[in-house]
Image (tube, rainbow, N blue to C red):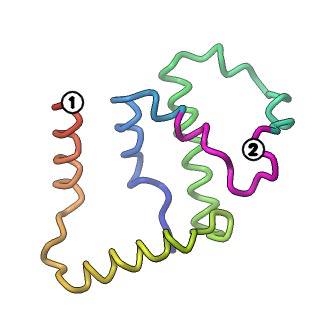
């Protein structure tokens, strides 16, 4: 089963360093939308999210992302992988199977990523 959740909110850390990340993610065309520029459903907002602070909107985006992850984990066919993505995952699994000791624990990997972000 694929996990789209980002390890319990780590993607939020990424967004807090660069709020543009949220816009980039949300502007990607939806693979299941026939016309990605047609969002009639979005015209009928339940509330005006623009009245929220930036922090509250980022939290809302995180909550929405988590709900998508939950549904995608329960039904992976909702977010199908391309052939290229499948091949890359197979390559990475084979690389790990060949040398499992080369893998770094998640906390160490995240520390390296955060250090790189701070240097920029």
Residue 91's quadrant in the figure?
Answer: bottom left
The percent position of residue 74, horizontal first and vertical second, equals: 62, 68
Label number found at residue 36: 2
Q: Which residue appears at 60% of the width and 17% of the height?
A: 52
Q: Work out whether residue 112 or residue 31 is closer to the camera in this orientation and state it.
A: 31
Q: Which residues are magenta?
A: 24-37
Q: Which residue corresponds to mark 1?
A: 120
Q: Which residue appears at 56% of the width and 36% of the height?
A: 61
Q: Is residue 119 left or right of residue 15?
A: left
Q: Judging from the image, what secondary structure is the residue with disc 1 in?
A: loop
The percent position of residue 79, horizontal first and vertical second, equals: 63, 63
Q: Is residue 105 above or below residue 107?
A: below
Task: List the single residue furthest toward the bottom.
Answer: 98
Disc 1: CA contacts within 10 A as few (<14), some (14-19) or many (>=20):
few
Q: Are marks 2 and 1 in contact (CB under 8 Å)?
A: no
The dominant secondary structure in magenta is loop
Q: Work out whether residue 11 or residue 18 is closer to the camera in this orientation and state it.
A: 18
CA separation in Å, label 2 and label 1? 33 Å
């Amino acid at each position: 089963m694929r996990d789209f959740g980002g390890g319990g909110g780590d993607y939020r850390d990424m967004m807090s360093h660069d709020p543009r990340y949220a816009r980039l993610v949300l502007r990607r065309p939806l693979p299941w939308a026939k016309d990605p520029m047609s969002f009639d459903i979005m015209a009928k907002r339940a509330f005006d999210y623009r009245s929220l602070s930036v922090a509250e909107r980022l939290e809302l985006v995180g909550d929405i992302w988590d709900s998508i992850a939950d549904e995608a984990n329960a039904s992976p066919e909702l977010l199908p992988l391309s052939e290229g993505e499948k091949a890359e995952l197979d390559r990475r699994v084979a690389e790990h199977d060949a040398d499992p000791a080369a893998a770094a624990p998640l906390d160490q990997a995240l520390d390296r990523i955060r250090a790189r972000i701070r240097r920029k």
